[in-house]
Image (cartoon, rainbow, N blue to C red):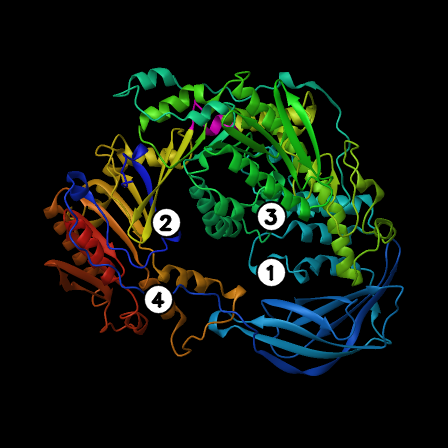
Amino acid sequence: MAPRRRLAPLGLSFCLALSPLAACKKQEGADTGQAAATGQANAPVEAIPDEGPLPELRTGPSQVEEHPAVEVQLSHRYAARGAERADYFEFEMTGPDIGASSRRVHIVGHPEIMAVAYPDGGNWTVTMRRDGTLGVPDSLSGVVYGVQGYGHERKAHGWHFKLATGGGGAEDAELPERFAQHFPFSAGSGSFEFGWARQHPWASFASARLASRGASEAEITAMLETGRSFGRGGTDLSRLMDTTTAALSLQEALQHERGLRMRRGAPERTIDIGELQGPPLKQHPFEAMRAALPDPKAGVAEPMAALVPADFWYLRFSDIRLLLRTLDEADAWLTPVIQILQENSENQELTRRYQAQLGVRRSDLARAFGNTVVARIALVGSDPYLREGSDLTLIFEAKEMGVLRTELERQLESWKAEVPGVEASSFRVREHEVAVFRDPTGAVRRHQVEVGSHFIVSNSRGAITRVLDAIDAKTPRLGDEPDLAFMLARDPVESDALAFMSDAFIAAVISPQQKLLEARRQLAYADLLVPGYAALLHGWLEGSAPESVEAMIAAGYLRQDELSHAGGEAISFAPGQAARSSWGSVGALTPLIDLEPATKVSEAEKLAYEDFARGYQQNWTTFIDPVAVRLDLASEGESTRASVSVRVLPLIANSEYSDIREVVGEQRVEVPEVRDGLQVVWAVGKDTRLRRELNQLAKSFSGDGKIGIDWLGDWVAIGALDRKAILEVAWYELETVQRPAAEAKDEDEDVRMARRIGALPIFAIADTSNPAGVAATLAGLKALVNSAAPGMLAWGEDSRHREVPIVRIAASATATDPEVKALADAISLYYANAGGKLIFALREDVMHTLIDRALD
């Protein structure tokens, strides 16, 4: 299959060559511009040299500088004998600079003592807590561990101490509160520890629960307001209805409330849900739009879409091996990136969760099936909440049904051997007999049915019932939807994979029914987390796991009423197991489609949904629109090239879409191919206001009108060739999670960073329409810089490649300013004008590759 190019929708296209899929040795350039358009053979191009293996995190034990033990005395003590029975004691450490970026306290021989250390002026304060039934030892010894500095100067220290606890120390009733305040940081969840702006929900729960033990209602209310000022509040229902809300931040706020023992009461739901009106959005006239296309009948049919409800998302692969490969790449690359962006260290184990629920194993599918057994496979679902718990249905189009059935039965048996208590049952949907295999915990919940040449496997009774309704034409089908027909005719190509979210799916996601159920489920999830968090807190403070729920309640870590939801649904919990209820479990909530539909809502829920609907209407234009994503693979020698095409119709008001449209105008471009790295291309409209304003600003800035962008052509691009230098710079910033780098200490930190940035294979390219204008602008810029900062920059021709002059701009080696002079060899900017394109890069070898592509 040959790679293809498409017109960029709205002039914006992300052209990806996914090197993880490629597993290539060395790539030899790319098709661009005229050569691709005319079918001419590409001339050989100079590839960037192989730079060796990718960098790895520096691991291993850190060398700790041990400091001699110092004698310390108790400064404060307190025996708590109210809601909790515990002894608190505190001391200060003085001496050299011991303010560290992270800290841990180790009490020798007493794992049951929990200690926290925190800066207090020029000293450190260490506060400790021990079970009050154990008494206080006469003496203690320990170590405060901390890390000072940053980068290669970061060093671990251990400050030893000896503490006599038998006497002394002022009585201080605020010790429990101080311990609770600093506990999250000791637990490794605070912003001080990792430089992050938020804590983990567990730390919010733990600190709030500790602070609220024995506190009055007024004090707890004050704590709640304080938490809100730090971003741990504001859990109003409208926030719970944000489809793309940050789950970690939301649960942090909810757990702060749960830790303070504040629970919403059972809501009075008396309003009919039919009174709630969703955003008044209309559909495009897709049939008329399709009729206006050059060939309205163009496009490749999606036969599996006839098996899917119109309001489900849809992901079809023409080869099951491509699906499995895509999932592998998502696990390796997409999941870690999402976790980093969400500042979330949790591993939801989504792959294992859904494999167990469906009773399949990905590795076995890869080994057993190919295109001789399965013709196509589709994944479908009714909501976007895969992280929390969603319905997922696999539809196999079988070529060899007997082989397919046998292998899926074998995989189910392997899960039965791993998950105890899986039992079989069945139910009917008209003439279809649906077999169900489920264990009491819901870890396995496989529903399966055969319909003609299709074998359907789902983790949801509601979902498989809806799929059968679509097959029997009892509900609108995706294959009959006009938006899908338009998208297929708009891009009349057959892709290896197609993902589609229809108007009907988006309308369902923002409907009162789904929004209210998801908000209620988020609150239920917060309730389900509490018993486990309370057990974890018991372990942190007591040094052992709780023996029973009754022991947790007796010790004050959990309340009896926290074993049920606000609506009265019981929560079952035992230490060492996940809490469960009719809403599901901590590991996997019940899919929305399997919950009882909402029929009545409370006044608070009604107001919250109306607030959501107003915000949605303000941010979107009149229409809701479908989204289509295509994936194609092409073999190129020993490597494989992945091409991803995204077509998104919605124009979101007051957002980046408006900014893009202002830049693009009506301009459309054919996007250059990419074979390594990432490239982002913007069309630049000829008559857009932004172009005129930028041109006028540049001319007025220069003062003589020589600098402008009259020469700019149809598009601009930025990107990076896929090289390990990008990872090396990223690794440089990950100093808090790896051993310090062995850097040369005689070189300035700014110079080291400049060298790293200068090694990046990043580039920028601008299409040009007037070479003389480009030359005049660059000459004007050079004159302007030299007049403003004489002698600071070296600016001139450095070399030639294929007779194209390459100009280098860098700090002057003869500059009088030593800081500027030090950067002379650290970082440079190169540019060249080749093939009607103005090219910028930080590396000369990157310039050679880009010049080759421009000329060829």
Indicate left or right for 50 with 99 as reference.
Answer: left
- Mark 2: amino acid: Leu
Start-end of magenta stretch: 616-626
Is 344 above or below relative to 77? above
Residue under label 2, please give it: 18
Mark 1 → mark 2, Cα distance in angstroms:
36 Å
Between 442 and 734, the one nearer to me in the picture: 442
Label whose residue precedes the other's in the sequence (1 or 3):
1
* Measured Cα–Cα span from mark 1 to mark 3: 25 Å
Residue 110 placed where, x, y %? 79, 71
Q: Secondary structure at mark 1?
A: helix
Nearest to N terminus: mark 3 or mark 4? 4
Hey, what amino acid is under mark 4? Gly
Disc 1 marks a residue whose amino acid type is Phe
Q: Earlier in the sequence, mark 1 or mark 2?
A: 2
The structure residue drawn at horizontal position 89% and vertical position 55%, both measured from the top left corner, is: 82
Foreground: disc 1 or disc 3: 3
Q: Is residue 325 magenta?
A: no
Seen in the image, is 44 located left or right of residue 196?
left
Q: Amino acid at mark 3?
A: Gln
Circle 3 sits on which residue?
348
Q: Are marks 3 and 4 in contact (CB under 8 Å)?
A: no
Q: Is 620 covered by the magenta stretch?
A: yes
Write down the quadrant of residue 420 in the picture. top right
Would you call the spot at circle 2 few (<14 residues within 10 Å), some (14-19), or many (20 or more)? many
Dominant secondary structure of the residues highlighted in magenta in the image: loop
Counting residues from the start of the chain, the first of labels 2 and 4 encountered is 2
Which residue is disc 4 drawn over? 52
Given contact means CB atoms under 8 Å apart, are the residues at marks 3 and 2 in contact? no
Q: Which label sits in the foreground, 4 or 1?
A: 4
Q: Is residue 625 left or right of residue 196?
A: left
Residue labelled with disc 1: 192
